Amino acid sequence: MNEPFGFTITARDRRSRARTGRVTVRGKTFETPVFMPVGTAATVKGMQPSQLNELGVGILLCNTYHLFLRPGSKIVASQGGLHKFMGWDGAILTDSGGFQIYSLSDLTEVDDEGLVIKSHLDGTRHHFNAEKIMAIQHDLGSDIVMAFDQCVPHDAPPTEVLRALERTTAWARRCKLEQERFCSDAALFGIVQGGMDPELRRRSAEELCALDLPGYAVGGLSVGEGKELMHSVLDATIPHLPDVKPHYLMGVGPPDDLVNAVAAGVDMFDCVVATRNARNGTLFTRQGAIKMRNSAYRDDPAPLDPECPCPTCQTFSRAYLRHLFNAREMLGPILATIHNVCYFRDLMAAMRTAIREGRFEELRREVLAVYE
């Protein structure tokens, strides 16, 4: 019988809180630190699941709110769950939809019970609470499910931040009870809130840790507060989370933020920066970001990144990629997405190797010199 969930720390950096680990969930395994490509609507845009598997991607993120609206969680359940529906054998983490309280705030009404949201697709109104969010994720068949939380803007008034924290804790308790009612072996992660206030972050972490959940996420960052403040809040939050459980920083992805967050003790990441930037023609390389439409690459025969082993860099020139983007050929974003996913895969692998070999700080400085 497969172990429902396990996390093992395999190496630690001596000069920071960086560590490597191994997560096992429902018989699926992936190494940490890990970057999860975002497949909001049960697809990583521009890539087949078989390609993701060939690239060594071990876990994807999908979105509860979006999949509830389209095609509907009951439809996904009737097709055998997300894994069978989208043809993906790796692990799947589903976001609870709490971020939509922030990103679609003009369409939402929030109270202690939950929220009412007007669909961004057709204007229909839907009610979500902790119990419904868990039921949807149960229908989806996710391996790691996120507790329902309330994310607020970085400059929200203190009273609003406190109210969101209290709701997040109350909703997490209800999520755990609902998870137990379903007798589900999916791993439930809590989400720490508390705005930019270190004391509220400590309180949120301690209240969630009392629930003894399999893992913990830090939410409510990268919401306009700026990088320096983001990392200051992160540094103040991670020490209050159980060292022996995975730490997940939600929605953060630029390379400089990744290496700094790993140094702070983060194990898991997701962000649209890899795939969205690829579709818009911005590609990440070991030499820095490249804007593919720039005229400098019009007749450049060099590969996008000479050090990259991905199929895009091994086969095509910068000149050809620029041509595809300027001609608005769909192959351009597809090849760019393959490359960016590979870049983030390789960055995380390089960090894992550097931690094991005791040279993580040197690697961090190299990445910051290019991207900070």
Image: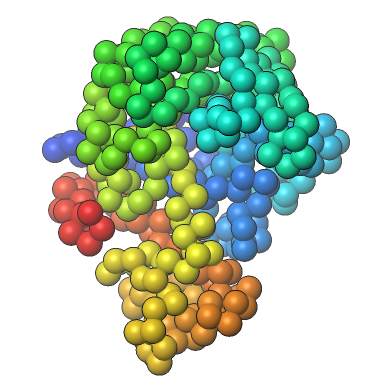
Query: Between residues 117 and 22, which one lies in front from this camera angle?
Result: 117
What is the quadrant of the N terminus in the image? top right
* Colour option used: rainbow
Q: Is residue 13 left or right of residue 315?
A: left
Q: Is residue 96 left or right of residue 71?
A: left
The answer to whether 323 is drawn above or below residue 112 in the figure is: below
Image quarter of residue 126: top right
Q: Residue at x 38, y 64 (%)?
A: 284
Q: Position of residue 160 (x, y in %)?
A: 43, 15
Q: Position of residue 238 (x, y in %)?
A: 30, 25
What is the quadrant of the C terminus in the image? bottom left
Q: Residue at x 49, y 50 (%)?
A: 272
Image quarter of residue 215: top left
Residue 154 seen in the current view: yes
Residue 134 seen in the current view: no
Image quarter of residue 203: top left
Q: Where is residue 108 in the image (x, y as percent from the top left)?
A: 62, 25
Q: Residue at x 62, y 58 (%)?
A: 45
The answer to whether 256 is drawn above or below residue 67 in the figure is: below
Q: Position of residue 98 (x, y in %)?
A: 55, 27
Q: Which residue lies furthest to the front in this view?
A: 106
Query: Between residues 240 and 276, which one lies in front from this camera angle?
Result: 276
- Number of numbered discs: 0
Q: Which residue is drawn at 51% across and 85% down?
A: 323
The answer to whether 127 is drawn above or below residue 338 in the figure is: above
Q: Is residue 298 left or right of residue 352?
A: right
The answer to whether 230 is drawn above or below residue 371 in the figure is: above
